[in-house]
Amino acid sequence: MLHFNRALFVYNQTAGEDDTHLKLEKTLHIFAQAVDELIVLNTTSEEQLQQACVKYSDQVDLLIILGGDGTVHTCLNSIAPLAIRPIIAILPGGTSNDFSRTLGIPQSLNEAATSLLNGSIIDTDIGKVGEHYFMNFWGIGLVTETSENINSDEKKRLGSISYVLSTLRTLNRTEPFHYKIQSTDTELEGDAILLFVLNGRYIGTTQLPIASLSPFDGKLDVLIVRDSNLAAFRELFALQNPTVENEQLNELEYIQVTALEIMQPIGNKVDMDGEMYEETAQQITVLPGHLRMIHVNAL
């Protein structure tokens, strides 16, 4: 079992979850057995959450984040620029909890806490865009429109199914955009409905069938979907085969990069880990092994 001298357990009471006290009951006592000094901090705003992560980053061995993808995104953006960064443990407390799934963390909180303390610490890649960072994905097109079309009441009642319903509502009115991107060894241009730069393996709780996708390989995976037809989905599942080459694809573009320049489109809204940003940044890079994270059975 892992053991830590000092840890910060942080959560955001205002992040949309109504049963935080139950989540604390299921997890706190488990971590208390493995940490000599456990600091528990309830933040009431995104700003307080950021400040807490920065304040304690060089004072604790472990940062335990209880929350969904938005809370995780806020915490990681707070500590990623810092020189001293603690080990990170994610407790899945939101709707999708996508990156926790990539790390193999069980979605039952009690099981997640126990599994994390019996897990392994691994250097994990993170994407950098301007002054911001993403763990799971950077995306434009269909993904941003889907996020904006999610009904908040529907999300509370149906959880991750709300993302599926929003996607179905959005597909019929998604307009293609023109893209032009360049990496160190290739340039791609055309029209698409969706452009992903991926680091994690899950989107909206759905595992992407891409064999080479990993947050531990020092690379980002670029997936471009030209159309929403059946052929595109067939090609996506063909990427389960690691020998499939980009030249064999008609409806998709798929490459791996360490850095990427987005020349077009410029000014489009961007979805990073489920959080909306107003403008497309031009430079995207991977920071290999930048964060130490506990994984349970990472794929």
Image: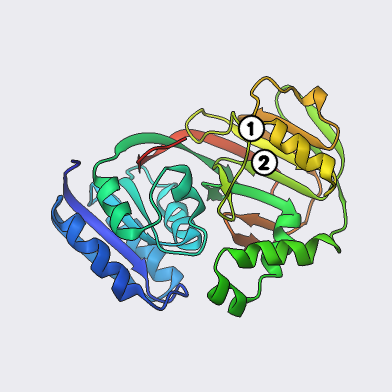
Q: Quadrant of residue 146?
A: bottom right
User: Which residue appears at 28% of the width and 53% of the height?
Assistant: 113
Which residue ends up furthest to the left in the rendered image?
Answer: 36
Residue contact between numbered discs 2 and 1, judged by CB atoms under 8 Å? yes
Question: Is any part of residue 279 visible from this angle?
Answer: no
Q: Quadrant of residue 186?
A: top right
Q: Position of residue 250 (x, y in %)?
A: 86, 32
Query: What quarter of the picture does the N terminus occupy?
Result: top left
Residue under label 1: 259
Closer to us: 67 or 235: 235
Classify residue 171 as left or right of residue 72: right
Closer to us: 149 or 75: 149
Identified by mark 2, the residue type is Gln
Q: Position of residue 144 (x, y in %)?
A: 71, 59
Precedes in sequence: disc 2 or disc 1: 1
Checking the image for residue 55, the label placed there is: none
User: Which residue appears at 85% of the width and 62% of the height?
Assistant: 172
**Inter-mark Cα distance, 2 to 1:** 7 Å
SS of the residue under disc 2 = strand
Residue under label 2: 283
Vertical placement of 222 versus 40: above or below? above
Q: Position of residue 219 (x, y in %)?
A: 57, 30
User: Which residue appears at 80% of the width and 29% of the height?
Assistant: 187
Identified by mark 1, the residue type is Ala
Which residue ends up furthest to the top in the rendered image?
Answer: 243
Pointer 1 local density, CA inside 10 Å: few below 14, some 14–19, many at least 20: some
User: Which residue appears at 63% of the width and 37% of the height?
Assistant: 209
Vertical placement of 107 versus 13: above or below? above
Q: Position of residue 102 (x, y in %)?
A: 48, 43
SS of the residue under disc 1 = strand
